[in-house]
Image (cartoon, helix red, strand yellow):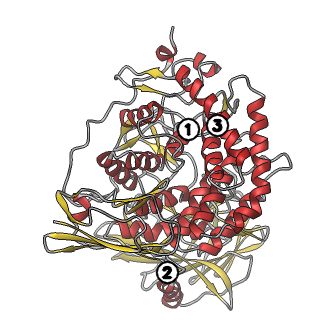
Amino acid sequence: MTRRDLIQLTAASALPPPAAISEPPKIDFRYRPLQWQTAYCFPDDPHKSLVDDRGRLLYGNPGRRGADFYPAIVEFALPGADNLPITRQELESPAVPIVHTRIGHDKTSIELVSFATNRASEGRVDNLIVRINSTHRAAPLLRIHTRGKLAVEGTKATLDAKPFLTSSRPLVLRDAGSSYALQLPAEPVTGDILFRFPQQGQSIETADPAAVLAEARAFWSSWHPFSGGIEWQLPKPYAHFLTACARNILQAREVRNGRLTFQVGPTCYRGLWVVDGHFILEAARYLGYDKEALQGLATTWTYQRPDGALDAGGGPEHYKDAAIAMFSTVRQSELSRDWRAFDEFLPSMRRAAAFLQSRRDKTRDGLIVPGFADGGFTKGYEFTNTLWTLAGLRSVASRPGTDEFSSFYQDLRAGFETAAKREMIQHPSGFTFLPMVLREDSAWQRDEWSRPRPQAAQWALSHAIYPGVVFDPAHPVVRGHIDLMKWCSQEDVPAETGWLPHEGLWTYNAAFAAHAYLWAGEHEWARRTFHGFLNHASPLYCWREEQPLRGSLVAGYVGDMPHNWASAECVLYLRHMLALEDGSRLRLLEGIGAPEMSMREPFRLKNTPTRFGPVSLELIPEGSRWRLQFERGSGPAPSAVTLPKTLGGLRLSSGAKIDPGAAMFTATWG
C-alpha cells in the first residue's frame, strides 16, 4: 500500500474556480461561529473582561487554561422567561467595545449593556446595565455559576470573602445547588438596573448608570486605532474590520513581568507565542505602534534559552521559534529603517542559528527533525521546523557580515529539496503536493480516522511562500500547496487544516492561504478566501481559533477568542492588497479589482512602513476613471514598482513606465 493510499482524501471537495465578480464584497458573517465571546476591557488592561454571545459575563480564567475555564459566570434571567431568544448582539461601533445584547420578543424584551470603567476614585470595574421592557411585573435575578462561596448583604455580594458585586437594587441570595441566584424584588420595572463588578478586589458603591456609560463612551470616542503619523482610509466593511482588529490587539496586550507583551488572547493564549507574535508585531507597525512593537520584539528574545532555542508558548520542540525570532528582527528593522535592534540581537540570532544547526546535524536527512509541527500535527518527522528555519536564515543572510547564516541556508535548502522530491505525492485530483508529515513517520500507520489530513500543518509552507519568499512562484512545492489549498476549501476557506481534522476549520489559516494566493497572482482565489475569512468572524469582529463547519456533529471549538493572530492577519492582508513587498519589488494594488472599485470610495494609506521607506498612496474614483497618487519617503529604492495593467476592467492609461527610484508618481486607469 502506498502512502497516497493511506492519506484520507474524501472529506473535502474541491471548489470550482472562482468566477470574476464586480459587486461589492458581501460580508454578512454567514459562517460566524455559533458560540463566541468578546473582550470589552481597555488597552493593556490586566483584567480581560469577556462577554459571550448570550450576554453572560465570563470571569476568572487565569490564562494558559482551557478557553472554557471560568471559575465564575454571571447570567441575567427572568423567572418564567428563561427561554427568551437572543435577538441581536452588537458593539456600539467597531471602535467602541460597549456590547449590547438584546433578548426577547414583542411583549417582553431585555437589553444587556456590558462595558468597563476605570474611574480614578474607584479603579477598574465591569458594569452591566439591564433594561427590561415588559407590561408585566418582573422579579429579575442573576445566576452566578461558581464553585466559590457567595454571600450577600443588602446590595453587595462577596465571592470567597472578596468584593464581587454591587447592585443598584437590593439582592436576596438563593443557593440553587449548581449555582447561586441573586433575586431582585418583584415589582414593575422602570429605569435601568446597574450591576457593578470590581476587578481589583476593591469595595465600590453603586453609581448613576447613565454617568458610568457616558464615561466609557468618552474614553473610546477619544481612542484612535492608528498612531505615529500613520493613517488609513478604507471603504466599509474593510474599515470596520481594521478598526476592530486594532482594538482587539491592544485589548489583549499586557505588561507582564515589567515587559510589554503582545498576547494572542485573553484566556488559554494569554501569553507570548513567537510565531503569532511575529505577525502581531508586524501589524502593530502597520498601525503606527513603533515603540511598542520594538518593546514586543525585545520581549520575544527574553524567551531564549542558554542553548539558543526559544521556549515560549509553542514549547521547547517548536524549534522553528528560534528562526521566527530572527525573521521578526529583520522585519522590524526593515520597517523601522533602523538596524540598531538587528545589531543588538545579532549575537542572540547567532546562538539561535547554532542551535538549529545542531538540531539539523543530529539527523541523517539534512532536515530539522523530529519536532513539533503544530497546526494539526504534534511531534514527529515533519517539514515545518525546516521551512521556517529556511525563511529565518534567508532573511538574516540578506544583511552584510552574515556569511554563516547564508552557508547554513544553502546546506539546509539542499537537504530540503532532496527530501521534498522524495516526499511529493500525486493527488487523485491530478496535482502533486508536499505533505508536511514525512513518509517515515508512524502517524501514517494509524487507522483512517486518526491519520493526518493531507492539508494538516501546511501553515508553515504558506509562510515560507509568503512572507518568507523562500521559493519562486513556479516551484513545484508552491504550485502543489496552492492546488491543495484550493482542493480542501469549504465555506470559501481551506478546511481541516488544523487541530480539528474532521469537519472543522482553522479560521485565520484562510488568511495564510489568501496571502499565498495574492503573492502568486491568484487574485480571485485571494479575494474569495479573504472574504471567507471575514465571514467566519463573529458579528463583533473577532475570531475563534478553530470552529466547526456548519452542520458538523463531530467538530468542536478550539483555542482562544478573540484570537489576535487572526486580528493581525486581517490588518496585514488589508495593507498588502494595496502595497505588497515581494523581495526587492514593490507590487501595488494587487488585491484591488472590480468588487473593491464598485464601492466607489477612496483607498488611502499615509506613511505605511515598508522595507523601501514609508509609502503613501491614494486610489480615488474620478468619474469613469481611477487615479493613483503615490509617494515614497527615504529608504532603499525597490528594484521595480509594479501596477496592474487592468484594474476592474479599466486599462492602465498613464503611469505604465515607473522609475522605481521615483519619490512620487501618478497613474490612471480608464
Q: Residue at x 41, y 74 (%)?
A: 663
Instruction: Specify the label residue 410 is tagged with.
Output: 3
Q: Nearer the viewer, residue 62 or 56?
A: 62
For residue 380, above or below residue 156: above
Q: In the structure shown, which secondary structural element does the residue marked by tag 1 occupy?
A: loop
Q: Earlier in the sequence, mark 3 or mark 1?
A: 3
| Whether residue 303 is visible | no
At which x and y percent is residue 502?
A: 47, 32
Q: Say above or below: 363 vs 372.
A: above
Q: How many marks?
A: 3
Left or right for 327, reference 555? right
The image quadrant of residue 138 is: bottom left
- Indicate the amino acid at tag 3: Gln
Label 3 residue SS? helix
Q: Residue at x 72, y 83 (%)?
A: 203
Query: Pointer 2: what residue?
Result: 224
The residue tagged with tag 2: helix, strand or loop? loop
Q: Residue furthest right?
A: 306
Disc 1 residue type (three-letter): Trp
The residue identified by callout 1 is 499
Q: Nearer the viewer, residue 45 or 624?
A: 624
Residue at 75 percent of width and 49 percent of height: 310
Query: What amino acid type is highlighted by mark number 2?
Result: His
